[in-house]
């Protein structure tokens, strides 16, 4: 069975450090809940003994990434150092951010850049014209790949057989009443999107929101990311997205192909 793996997952067990893995699991849990968490909450969510969770939290606190009032634990602003390190060292972000800025300015709409991470997409860059204010899709925001335009644009890089197996292994939970969860229909949709060179998703990932995406390819044609533009259904029709946004997205994607190694 084919599973969409995170980078580095395929390495052998001899390279695996279990204690570090446990610490990262606890670290990630803070992002799943906006409120501070107790030791018991974190231990239970990470499926770890309390003593192990306590040592991990103490280590993170000593390093300055976690703070505690004696009962509740929360992240500190120091974690932004990790995010900043990723964004400043990632070639895709460095190349695409000015392109997103120009794209957003030309269309007067929000544009975003996402990458594939397992069965999800992560938004790692975005641009917004001064007049547009929005909430929801911020840096680090995750959504299921199967029901998002950026996700479908990137899933098109897999062969039909691998894609069918990957879709079968995904948890295809409906996000809205419009979410397509049927494996065969999704497979046909992504294959069609691959041929068209873009993906348009209408209210499947978020209520009242539609978006259009194109894949971003590096110099050798390999898909490494996707860029999109989206808007509320009351403002922009699917036809307008194709007529007005798609040419801009395609031009932006084509302009960076030779720059991505």
Image (tube, rainbow, N blue to C red):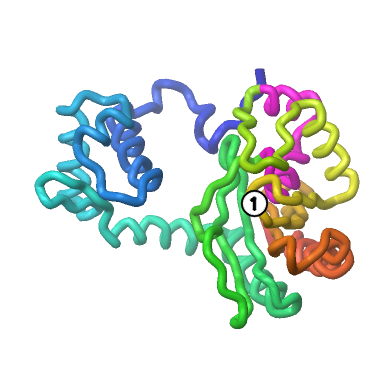
Q: Residue at x 85, y 51 (%)?
A: 197
- Give coordinates of residue 202: x percent, y percent: 75, 51
- Give coordinates of residue 40: x percent, y percent: 21, 32
Q: Residue at x 31, y 38 (%)?
A: 26
- Give coordinates of residue 126: x percent, y percent: 59, 65
Q: Magenta segment, principal secondary structure?
A: helix
Picture quarter containing residue 18? top left
The quarter of the rendered structure image containing the C terminus is: bottom right
Residue 28 seen in this snapshot: yes
The quarter of the rendered structure image containing the N terminus is: top right
Residue 255 seen in this snapshot: no
Picture quarter containing residue 85? bottom left
In the image, residue 244 sits, relative to residue 116, either above or below, namely below
Q: Between residues 214 and 109, which one lies in front from this camera angle?
A: 109
- Give coordinates of residue 242: x percent, y percent: 86, 61
Q: Residue at x 62, y 28 (%)?
A: 170
Dot 1 lies on which element? loop
Picture quarter containing residue 105? bottom right
The residue that disc 1 covers is 207
Magenta residues span 146-168
Farthest bottom residue in view: 130
């Amino acid at each position: 069975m084919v599973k969409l793996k995170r980078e580095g997952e395929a390495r052998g067990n001899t390279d695996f450090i279990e204690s570090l893995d446990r610490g990262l699991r606890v670290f990630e849990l803070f992002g799943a809940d906006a409120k501070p968490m107790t030791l018991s909450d974190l231990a239970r969510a990470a499926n770890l003994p309390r003593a192990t969770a306590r040592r991990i939290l103490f280590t993170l606190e000593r390093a300055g990434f976690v703070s505690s009032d004696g009962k509740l634990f929360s992240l500190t602003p120091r974690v932004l150092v990790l995010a900043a390190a990723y964004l400043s060292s990632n070639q895709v972000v460095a190349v695409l951010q000015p392109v997103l800025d120009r794209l957003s300015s030309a269309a007067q709409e929000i544009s975003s850049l996402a990458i594939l991470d397992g069965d999800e997409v992560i938004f790692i860059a975005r641009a917004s014209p001064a007049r547009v204010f929005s909430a929801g899709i911020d840096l680090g925001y995750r959504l299921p790949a199967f029901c998002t335009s950026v996700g479908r644009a990137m899933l098109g890089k897999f062969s039909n057989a691998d894609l069918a197996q990957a879709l079968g292994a995904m948890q295809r939970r409906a996000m809205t009443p419009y979410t397509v969860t049927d494996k065969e229909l999704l497979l046909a949709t992504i294959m069609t999107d691959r041929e068209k060179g873009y993906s348009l998703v209408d209210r499947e990932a978020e209520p009242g929101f539609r978006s259009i995406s194109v894949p971003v390819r590096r110099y050798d044609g390999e898909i490494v990311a996707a860029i999109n533009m989206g808007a509320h259904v009351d403002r922009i029709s699917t036809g307008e997205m194709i007529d007005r946004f798609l040419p801009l997205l395609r031009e932006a994607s084509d302009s960076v192909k030779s720059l991505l190694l």
